[in-house]
Image (cartoon, coloured by chain):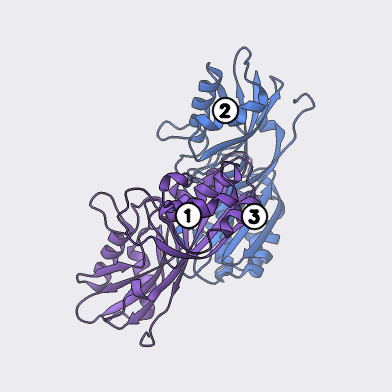
Chain colours: A blue, B purple
Amino acid sequence: MKYLLKLSYLGTHYCGFQVQPNGNTVQAELCRATETLFARPCAVTGCSRTDSGVHAEEYYATVAFEGTSSVPCERIPQALCTYLPEDISVSAAWRTPDDFSVRRAVSGKEYCYRIWNGRQKNPFCADRAFFYPGTIDTARMTEAGKRLIGRHDFASFMASGSDMEDTVRTVTGLRVERDGDFVCIYVSADGFLYNMVRIIVGTLIEVSEGKIAPEEIPDILSARDRMRAGRTAPAGGLFLHKVFISVPEGIV
Amino acid sequence: MKYLLKLSYLGTHYCGFQVQPNGNTVQAELCRATETLFARPCAVTGCSRTDSGVHAEEYYATVAFEGTSSVPCERIPQALCTYLPEDISVSAAWRTPDDFSVRRAVSGKEYCYRIWNGRQKNPFCADRAFFYPGTIDTARMTEAGKRLIGRHDFASFMASGSDMEDTVRTVTGLRVERDGDFVCIYVSADGFLYNMVRIIVGTLIEVSEGKIAPEEIPDILSARDRMRAGRTAPAGGLFLHKVFISVPEGIV
């Protein structure tokens, strides 16, 4: 049997989604909880990797196991929540065909990067927003961001050392919104390279600081050189905000 | 010299404000930070005690020390922030007369109790809101809450074992607000007994559940018996929201 699960998690205490040899992960916790609930070995597959300390407001994973379970589908979210720690929650579950692939079902994702732009640090934002007390020029950031939208080679916006060969992605949206002392940067794309959003945010911050001009963005893209883009913003401000997923007809 | 400090903190990792023999406290952290900044022994006094795990969006404390300091007053908040952990922040500082008492200057406080009323637990609310998935009848809570407003003996709403003799307090406001899946209960008073807000919230939840009628509140008050009120809501949902403070003319 296979189920699709919708979940959310606070990433602060995890080394990302994917199981790691050292350190606890969301996948490991999900595996433990599903194996307790279904009382047999379970294979958990996530819709994307997230880095250590990155959060997910929306995330999809499948759990597959041999044989059948008597747990009614509508009871699965609450039952899993009781087995999961406080910082991981399952909100929905659907039965899927055995050949359903959550990776293939995802057509895109939207990340939100939160910046706390107050004058002093905010205790309620530790590990949940990047504290940046300087002036933020959202109009200038938006100007630069527009130049990232579209199908481009984002090699300059990928962490050095990544072995990804195809670095072309389509950024479908990028907007900068101020809400009081918070500035949120939303980036949606068909896929993301390693650290791509955090490097985009770091670059937009340098645009705001006047170190990079919005007009330089096309050159930075065509350079395919990580050194040309800005710094990498910290993980704690990054939230996987939305997952664009198409589920097959067979799903119940 | 004496300074009045305005601060905020996330209470999750502290055994309340006041120094405890076992476990770290906000006062201990403030003491360490001020002694580092002013390079001498410092006496830190808080405007109120808060329980273990309770948060403060607004809090006032004084720091007093012998002699004078060359640190400009306007630099103190940022300097202290660098010496304090991520979950404590100082946002303002004022020089006060040496005989200024922060306890006497406070005429009242407002607490906010946050309830996460979604169907499933919310990972971003762990230790920051009380997860209560049942139906909440805010109108019925408000009906009961009205009967708590005014000058009453709140002995029934004080943790058993407290040695406070004068249990008369004036609740100046109590309102229940729904904001999406959050329900917030605001309680303001000239002073609070030990666990008073958490017992008020637990009682209002039992009112919502139909276990207590709003009309019973006057009887519960006059009984002066902790057993008559509802259960104690968990600490993590409680925020010291506002402190009503009057500062003397001499303050600079």
Identify the residue under disc 2. A79
Q: In the rendered image, which quarter contains the C terminus of chain B?
A: bottom left
Task: Indicate the position of residue A207 as horizontal and vertical percent values.
Answer: 59, 66
Gap in Å between the C-alphas at discs 2 and 1? 40 Å
Please state which amino acid type lies under the numbered disc 3: Asp
- The 10 Å Cα crowd at callout 3, few under 14, some 14 to 19, many 20 or more, is few
Numbered disc in front, either 3 or 2: 3
Horizontally, residue B191 falls left or right of residue B36, namely right
Q: Label 3: which residue?
A: B179
Secondary structure category for the residue under label 2: helix
Q: Residue furthest top?
A: A67
Split into 4 quadrants, where in the image is the N terminus of chain B?
A: bottom left
Q: Nearer the viewer, residue B185 or A39?
A: B185
To the question of a shared chain for discs 3 and 2, the answer is no
Residue displayed at 28% across by 60% down = B28
Amino acid found under the numbered disc labelled 2: Ala
Q: Is residue A194 visible?
A: no
Chain ID, mark 3: B
Closer to viewer: mark 3 or mark 1: 1
- How far across and down, in percent of the image, does residue B239 sit? 47, 57
Residue B209 visible in the current orientation: yes
Query: Does residue A61 lie above or below B137 as drawn?
Result: above
Chain at numbered mark 2: A
Residue A71 horizontal side relative to residue A88, left or right: right
For numbered disc 3, what is the local secondary structure?
A: strand
Q: CA distance from mark 3 to mark 1?
A: 29 Å
Residue B221, disc: 1
Evaluate if marks 3 and 1 touch, with contact meaning CB atoms under 8 Å apart.
no
Q: Judging from the image, what secondary structure is the residue with disc 1 in?
A: helix
